[in-house]
Image (tube, rainbow, N blue to C red):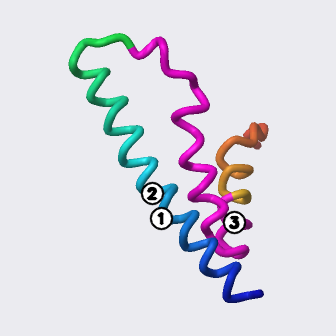
Amino acid sequence: MAKLELILKKIMLIVGILGVVIIYGGFLYLLFSGRSTAALPWFLLISPWICVYFGLSHVQQVAVISWFVSKFSFKKSSK
């Protein structure tokens, strides 16, 4: 079962990376060619990152979550 999980994680990681390259490449092409990107839903740009996240190991997933928490937590600065 562990081997199957490892294979599925690698597939998710590969699909996510290819998705990032293809979707963001198309988005940037539309953006720089002057065409409208208004028809693209916001989740289209986020969905490949979900595949990348689930393709990471558990330790890397926890590190990503802690990075997001530290990056986007609004703490009062002490003087």
Separation of residues labelled 2 and 1 (CA atoms):
5 Å
Secondary structure, mark 3, is: helix
Residue 54 x, y percent position in the rendering: 66, 62
Q: Is residue 21 left or right of residue 73?
A: left
* Residue named by callout 3: 61
The one of 15 and 53 positioned closer to us in this rendering: 15
Q: In the rendered structure, which segment of residues is drawn in magenta?
A: 37-64
Above or below 2: residue 46 = above
Q: Which residue is drawn at 32% across and 38% down?
A: 25
* Residue named by callout 1: 14
Q: Residue at x 67, y 88 (%)?
A: 3
For label 2, count other residues whose C-alpha is less than 10 Å away and answer few (under 14), some (14-19) or many (20+).
Answer: some
Secondary structure, mark 1, is: helix
Dividing the picture into quadrants, the one containing residue 57 is bottom right
Q: Is residue 30 left or right of residue 38?
A: left
Above or below 4: residue 70 = above
The residue under label 1 is which amino acid type? Ile
Q: Which residue is drawn at 74% across and 50% down?
A: 69
Residue 40 x, y percent position in the rendering: 49, 21
The residue under label 2 is which amino acid type? Ile
Question: Seen from this angle, which residue lies furthest left?
Answer: 33
* Residue named by callout 2: 17
Q: Do the residues labelled 1 and 3 touch (CB within 8 Å)?
A: no
